Amino acid sequence: MAGGYRVACDRISDGELKPGSQTARLVILAAGSLGSTELLLRCRDEHAGLPNVSQRLGHRWSSNGDFLTPAIYAFRAVEPTRGPTITSAINLLDGTVDGQEIFIEDGGFPDLAKGAMERLAGRPGATEQETALIEGVRWLVRLRLFDSIMPWFAQGRDASDGVLSLRDKKLFLDWDVETSEPTIEAILRTHQKLAMATGGAAIVPPAWAWSQDLITPHPLGGAAMGTSASDGVVDFRGEVFGYRNLFVSDGSIVPKAIGLNPSKTIAALAEHVAARIIAEGR
Ligand SMILES: Cc1cc2nc3c(=O)[nH]c(=O)nc-3n(C[C@H](O)[C@H](O)[C@H](O)COP(=O)(O)OP(=O)(O)OC[C@H]3O[C@@H](n4cnc5c(N)ncnc54)[C@H](O)[C@@H]3O)c2cc1C
């Protein structure tokens, strides 16, 4: 199609996935920080369909400083299984804690997670490990141990210097802990202080203590918004530099950690991208 794009995709037909393709004058990619970055990397480096996408593709990736510290309350039932997961926050994004910009939240164990685990355990073909995990969780629930564990949550403005690339045809994250360590340690110290002040004892998560591994539900960046292809992948409209009418609209265009739960920022960016497309009559 002249001036447009052909998108290879699977189509659902008679309950089966069949390879297909779709042509379009305008394409909006919205597969998330990892998904959109991976698709663009494959289009640029594997299939050469978009060979001129910025060399900054994959850069400025962040885990948004996400961190969880469990704390045990031996003499107090904190009941994190009741109510919504996050109900309050302490905004320390002004750098009060050792110059690090962090945002502390109360956590919880949502009923939804319990239901999902029950379904996982009950589904045909559940692995032994899955079943053992669920049994372990059921045992903790029966002993009411969850009532005494408070998961402290946090986000922070980390270094946002992770780099996603393709290695052996798989998405690979290059992330150096050193530059983000001060942010994570500031969060951990604050969690420890808050737990102690409220009658709890914080446990440093083993994954962090032993190997400085992190888990994030808030991946950001990879196809960052910038002023030109030398510092970003998309412009202020979300349009890929060098590719008219190819837009990215998801967490991959957020150019650095925002240190907050990001879904509303991502939604606001999506509205902004849509408004520009309409306003410019694309
Ligand atoms: C457990 C959990 C709890 C969370 N709680 C909160 C919260 O309380 N508040 C908050 O602000 N944020 C929360 N978040 C984060 C929030 O959900 C994400 O930041 C947000 O959804 C990211 O939006 P997105 O559009 O970038 O990507 P997504 O919402 O991940 O959307 C990307 C979509 O693209 C699809 N996709 C990926 N690859 C492909 C492909 N190759 N082809 C086709 N489709 C593809 C995915 O299946 C997905 O549907 C939470 C996340 C998790 C995991």
Image (tube, grey):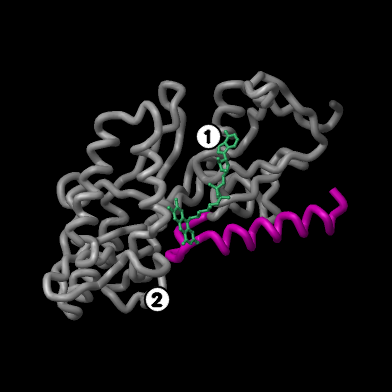
Highlighted range, magenta? 255-282
Locate residue 164 relative to residue 242 in the image: left or right: left
Residue at the image position 66 percent from the left and 29 percent from the top: 50
- The part of the image, by quadrant, that contains residue 272 is bottom right
Check the image and report above or below for 151 versus 53.
below
Is 265 left, or right, of 102 in this rendering? right
Q: Is mark 1 within 8 Å of ligand 1?
A: yes
Task: Relative to 171, say whether 142 is above or below.
Answer: below
Camera-nearest residue between 129 and 216 = 129
Magenta-span inclusion, residue 271 = yes
Circles 1, 2 touching at the beta carbon (< 8 Å): no
Q: How many marks?
A: 2
Q: In front here: 232 or 104?
A: 104
Q: Is residue 267 visible?
A: yes
Q: Where is residue 276 in the image (x, y as percent from the top left)?
A: 77, 57
Q: Residue tagged by mark 1?
A: 38
Between discs 1 and 2, the one toward the N terminus: 1
Q: Position of residue 5 (x, y in %)?
A: 76, 30
Q: Is residue 88 magenta?
A: no
- Amino acid at pointer 1: Glu
